[in-house]
């Protein structure tokens, strides 16, 4: 990819490296390590003197940059009330992926209802804003009327460009940049019903879902590598630059920690760009919504991979 630079660092260059919980980081890494080269990471971890020694022996810290400043954001898994059947209380459909996902915009799906009655409804919610933020996050848990949980995950999208409605509100001076959070957007839509619906339509991107049954409801949601992701240890990255499955050292205000690149997202583009997973539920959402930080991230690349690319500029 044009404009990328690679600079090899030492572990001494990583601020507070020695203070991290390397065992916790290793546990998360091994959950998806099979996706990073063909090495038997489990055996190598068992042979290491310590989790820290494992990382220091088999990886090299590499700073990958493209000229853009680092941006950390946060994401979470919503937990919403819903139902498997339509009712007066639950009338907003969560759709499975249709045969022609690129055919319709968000507004057309909502207004014209071309997908209704085709057996694509996998669950129902009570609020269109809940559906919108579920689509932004890409996965969620739904608490059914009997108290059981249903998990839904990303199945596909309509291919239309993603538009940040937070940025739209800022551009229209409806909200100050410092005030934009998922909660403030939700409040604004609730207070401005007609304008609020039109605001949601500004984002033509529409996400479709599937029910996830491979992961128990008390585990984290599935990431891009098909395994549960972990609050505080999993990040979404741009897989065109940062290899999925790689350990990634992040440094931002209040957090110096080793995480693993286990997810991706349509808004996560660039060498110094990461979305930190905060967990499930409203408190995780509150914490995730507060994150818009600078800093840096350093990818831990396997030794042979680091040797091939370091010093290379593309």
Image (cartoon, rainbow, N blue to C red):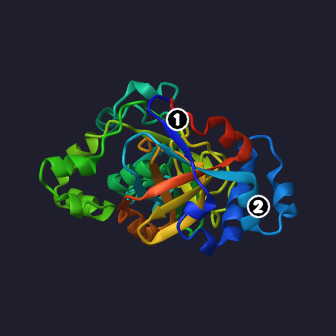
In the depicted view, which residue is nearer to us: 312 or 96?
A: 312
Q: Earlier in the sequence, mark 1 or mark 2?
A: 2
Q: Which residue appears at 38% of the width and 41% of the height?
A: 67
In the depicted view, which residue is nearer to us: 32 or 123?
A: 32
- Quick one: label 2, few (<14), some, or many (20+) residues within 10 Å? some
In the picture shown, does residue 258 fall above or below 36?
A: below
Numbered disc in front, either 1 or 2: 2
Decide if residue 213 is in sight here. no
Q: Which residue appears at 32% of the width and 60% of the height?
A: 182
Residue 314: x %, y % from top left: 51, 29
The residues tagged by marks 1 and 2 sit, at their Cα atoms, a distance apart of 42 Å
Answer left or right for 300 relative to 255: right
Q: Which residue appears at 52% of the width and 26% of the height?
A: 99
Answer left or right for 98 relative to 47: left
Place residue 44 in its image quadrant.
bottom right
Q: Which residue appears at 54% of the width and 55% of the height?
A: 235
- Quick one: label 1, few (<14), some, or many (20+) residues within 10 Å? some
Q: For numbered disc 2, what is the local secondary structure?
A: helix
Q: Label 2, on which residue?
A: 54
Residue 4: x %, y % from top left: 48, 35
Q: Residue lying furthest bottom in this view? A: 19
Q: Residue lying furthest left in this view? A: 173
Q: For numbered disc 1, what is the local secondary structure?
A: loop
Place residue 294 in its image quadrant.
bottom left
- Tag 1 near tag 2, CB within 8 Å: no
Q: Label 1, on which residue?
A: 97
Answer left or right for 184 relative to 40: left
């Amino acid at each position: 990819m044009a404009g990328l630079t690679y600079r090899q660092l030492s572990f001494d260059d990583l601020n507070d490296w020695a203070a991290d919980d390397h065992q916790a980081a290793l546990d998360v890494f091994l959950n998806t390590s099979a996706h990073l080269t063909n090495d038997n990471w489990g055996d190598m971890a068992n042979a290491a003197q310590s989790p820290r020694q494992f990382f220091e022996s088999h990886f090299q810290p590499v700073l990958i940059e493209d000229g853009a400043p680092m941006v950390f954001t946060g994401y979470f898994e919503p937990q919403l009330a819903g139902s498997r059947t339509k009712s007066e209380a639950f009338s907003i459909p969560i759709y499975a992926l249709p045969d022609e996902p690129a055919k319709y915009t968000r507004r057309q799906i909502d207004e014209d209802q071309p997908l209704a009655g085709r057996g694509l409804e996998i669950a129902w919610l009570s609020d269109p804003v809940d559906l919108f933020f579920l689509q932004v996050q890409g996965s969620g848990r739904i608490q059914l009327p009997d108290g059981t949980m249903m998990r839904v995950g990303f199945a596909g999208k309509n291919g239309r460009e993603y538009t940040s409605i937070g940025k739209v509100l800022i551009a229209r001076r409806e909200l100050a940049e410092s005030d934009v959070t998922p909660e403030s957007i939700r409040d604004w839509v609730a207070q401005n019903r007609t304008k609020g619906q039109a605001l949601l339509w500004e984002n033509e991107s529409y996400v479709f879902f599937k029910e996830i049954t491979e992961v128990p409801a008390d585990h984290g949601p599935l990431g891009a590598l098909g395994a549960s992701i972990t609050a505080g240890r999993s990040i979404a990255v741009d897989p065109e630059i940062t290899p999925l499955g790689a350990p990634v050292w992040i440094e931002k205000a209040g957090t110096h920690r080793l995480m693993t690149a286990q997810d991706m997202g349509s808004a996560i583009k660039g060498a110094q760009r990461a979305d930190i997973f905060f967990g499930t539920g409203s408190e995780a959402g509150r914490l995730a919504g507060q994150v818009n930080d600078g800093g840096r991230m350093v990818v831990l690349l396997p030794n042979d991979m680091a040797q091939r690319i370091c010093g290379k500029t593309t």
